[in-house]
Amino acid sequence: MKHNPMPLPQLLEAIELYFDCEMTDAEERQLRLEVGATPHSHPAIDEARAVMGLRRPKQLTPSLHHSIGVRQWMGIAAAIAVIVTLAVTFMRPGHSPAGQDLQEKCVAYVNGRCITDEDEVIALMAQNLGELQNGADMAEQSMIEELEYLAPMIEKFDSELNLNDI
């Protein structure tokens, strides 16, 4: 559902009515939703957010957000590719491309180059798993921040519903 923001002059007028205590409870609830979702920027809106207990979420520029996401997904994809390749290789004993026993040889392909040094392959796996963990940690932190932002609004909404149901 798309939200059509209230025009700035009308929003500022509503905020003034709020501060003058000239709104009904229903109008105040509607203003709270509008102030929490408006894309407009104005000192009066910031003051209303502060008084209402709302805060604006941290915003990243779309290009920065996109570049962080692409980097994370590339690391995750690389880690998954290495893990799947190694899993498939070790699950098919006796079917090695060079006719050698796969139990004795560790192989990885990076940018079309075959790497057979076991220490280097394990280091690549560790690096990819580290990137995968970093991506997962960043996603978890982002989710926590979003939930911290939403929790007060949900609690307030629930408490207002409970008061109105009495």
Image: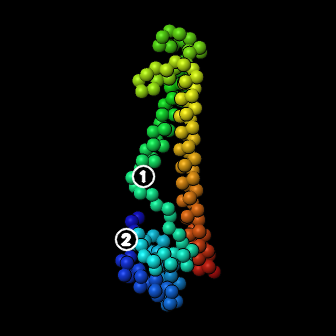
Label 2 sits on a secondary structure element that is loop
For this rendering, which residue is in front, 57 or 7? 57
Q: Which amino acid does label 1 sit on?
A: Leu
Residue drawn at the location 46% of the way across and 80% of the way down: 44
The image quadrant where one finds the C terminus is: bottom right
Would you call the spot at circle 1 few (<14 residues within 10 Å), some (14-19), or many (20 or more)? Answer: few
Identify residue for label 2. 4
Q: Can see residue 12?
A: yes
Q: On the rendered image, what quadrant is the N terminus found in?
A: bottom left
Q: Do the residues labelled 1 and 2 touch (CB within 8 Å)?
A: no
Q: Residue furthest right?
A: 166
Comparing 63 with 13, the one in front is 63
Q: Residue 124, position in %: x, y?
A: 54, 29
- Residues at marks 1 and 2, CA–CA distance in whole angstroms: 26 Å
Q: Earlier in the sequence, mark 1 or mark 2?
A: 2
Q: What element carries label 1?
A: helix
Q: How crowded is mark 2: few (under 14 residues within 10 Å), some or many (20 or more)?
A: few
Left or right of 8, for residue 82: right
